[in-house]
C-alpha cells in the first residue's frame, strides 16, 4: 500500500500517470503487478475538476492524492487458484487492513484520523484511516504468542496455563502478584512506541491530505489478542489519546443489520477481517 501524489491530471489520465509512479515506488515492473487505486477525497472539500477537466484535491490544487494497493501477480494468481480449487468464486481481493477498516469504521468520515490496531497471534498491524480510506500501515512481528512466552518465563506456567493467565488477568497491575502485567510489558510497550511513531509520522508527513484535524484522534483495538483486561486503559495512558475496543459489526449496522450474527463482540474481534470482507457487497 502506497500513498502517491499525482500532478494535475484529467480523469482518463489517472491510470496512466499511476503506472509511471508505480515504476518509481515499487521494485517490480508494473506489468508484473496486480494493482488498484483509490482517490482520496479530503474531509473538507472534495476532489474537484477544473474547466480543463483536470482533477485535483480540494485545498491542494497542485496535486491529487491517491492510495494504491499492489501485489505481485504471481501471489494474486495463487490465491485465486486456491479459491477456485476450493469451489468458490473469487469476487475481490484486498488488504487485510482495508477489510478490517470497513468492518470497524464502515464509511465513516470524521475530522480526526483513526489508528486501527490489529493484534494477532504473531504480528500487530497499525492502519491509519482518514478521509474514508486506509492511507498508511505499519507492522510489528509481535503478538499474542509472544505474550504467552513472556508469561511462561515469568511464572513457570505451561503453554495452556499461559493462555489462561493472559485472558484472566491481562493488564490488571495487582492481579497474580503483578507478574502477568510485568510479563506483558515487553510486548505491549513496543506496540505503544510504534503507535506513537505512527502518530508523529502521520502528523508530519500525511495529515495534509485529510483536510480535518492534523493528527490521529483515537485508536481502535481489534484482533484475537486485543481483548485483554485493561489493555485499552494502559495503551491510552502511554499514547495520550483515547483507546477503545473496536466493534467489528459497526460497518454492517447501517447497511446489513439483519445479517449480524449473535456473536459476543469480544469474540468477534478475532474475525474483523472476515467480517469486513463479507460486508464488502453492502458497503
Image: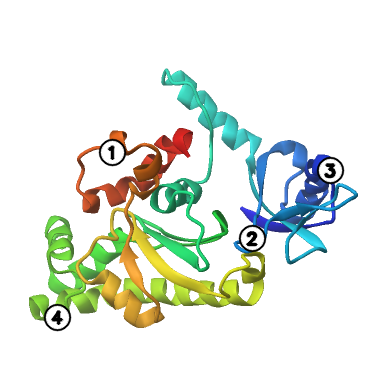
Contact between marks 1 and 3 (CB within 8 A): the answer is no
User: Circle 4 sits in a helix, a strand or a loop, which is it?
Assistant: helix
Query: Among all residues in the image, which is located at the extreme left?
Result: 176
Residue topped by disc 4:
178
Instruction: Name the one closer to the observer, 268 or 144.
Output: 268
> Mark 2 against mark 4, which lies toward the viewer?
2
* Badge 2 or badge 1: first in the primary sequence: 2
At mark 3, the secondary structure is: helix
Tag 2 near tag 1, CB within 8 Å: no
Q: Are marks 2 and 4 in contact (CB under 8 Å)?
A: no
* Residues tagged 4 and 1 counted as in contact (Cβ below 8 A): no
The residue singled out by tag 2 in the image is: 42
Name the residue that disc number 3 marks: 13
What is the CA distance from the residue labelled 1 to the residue labelled 3? 41 Å
Q: Which residue is mark 1?
A: 260
Task: Please report whichever mark, 4 or 3, sits nearer to the chain's N-terminal start.
Answer: 3
Depth check, mark 3 against mark 2: the one in front is: 2
C-alpha distance separating marks 2 and 1: 31 Å
| SS category of the residue bearing label 2 | loop
Tell me: residue 22, above or below residue 232.
above
Amino acid at each position: 500500500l502506497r500513498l502517491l501524489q499525482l500532478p494535475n491530471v484529467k480523469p482518463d489520465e489517472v491510470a496512466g500517470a499511476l503506472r509511471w509512479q508505480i515504476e518509481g515506488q515499487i521494485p517490480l515492473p508494473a506489468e508484473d503487478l496486480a494493482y488498484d487505486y483509490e482517490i482520496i477525497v479530503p474531509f473538507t472539500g472534495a476532489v474537484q475538476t477544473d474547466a480543463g477537466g483536470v482533477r485535483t484535491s480540494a485545498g491542494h490544487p497542485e496535486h491529487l492524492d491517491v492510495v494504491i494497493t499492489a501485489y505481485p501477480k504471481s501471489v494474486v494468481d495463487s490465491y485465486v487458484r486456491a479459491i477456485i480449487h476450493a469451489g468458490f468464486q473469487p469476487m475481490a481481493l484486498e488488504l487485510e487492513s482495508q477489510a478490517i477498516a470497513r468492518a470497524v469504521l464502515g464509511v465513516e468520515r470524521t475530522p480526526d484520523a483513526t489508528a486501527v490496531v490489529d493484534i494477532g497471534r504473531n504480528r500487530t498491524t497499525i492502519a491509519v484511516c482518514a478521509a474514508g480510506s486506509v492511507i498508511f500501515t505499519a507492522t510489528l512481528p509481535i503478538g499474542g504468542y509472544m505474550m504467552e512466552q513472556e508469561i511462561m518465563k515469568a511464572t513457570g506456567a505451561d503453554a495452556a496455563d499461559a493462555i489462561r493467565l493472559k485472558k484472566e488477568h491481562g493488564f490488571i497491575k495487582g492481579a497474580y502478584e503483578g507478574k502477568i502485567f510485568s510479563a506483558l510489558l515487553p510486548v505491549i510497550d513496543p506496540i505503544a512506541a510504534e503507535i506513537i511513531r505512527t502518530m508523529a509520522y502521520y502528523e508530519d508527513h500525511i495529515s495534509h491530505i485529510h483536510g480535518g484535524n492534523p493528527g490521529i484522534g483515537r485508536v481502535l483495538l481489534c484482533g484475537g489478542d486485543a481483548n485483554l483486561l485493561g489493555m485499552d486503559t494502559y495503551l491510552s495512558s502511554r499514547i495520550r489519546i483515547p483507546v477503545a475496543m473496536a466493534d467489528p459489526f459497526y460497518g454492517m449496522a447501517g447497511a446489513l443489520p439483519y445479517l449480524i450474527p449473535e456473536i459476543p463482540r469480544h469474540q468477534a474481534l478475532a474475525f474483523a477481517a472476515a467480517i469486513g470482507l463479507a460486508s464488502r457487497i453492502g458497503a
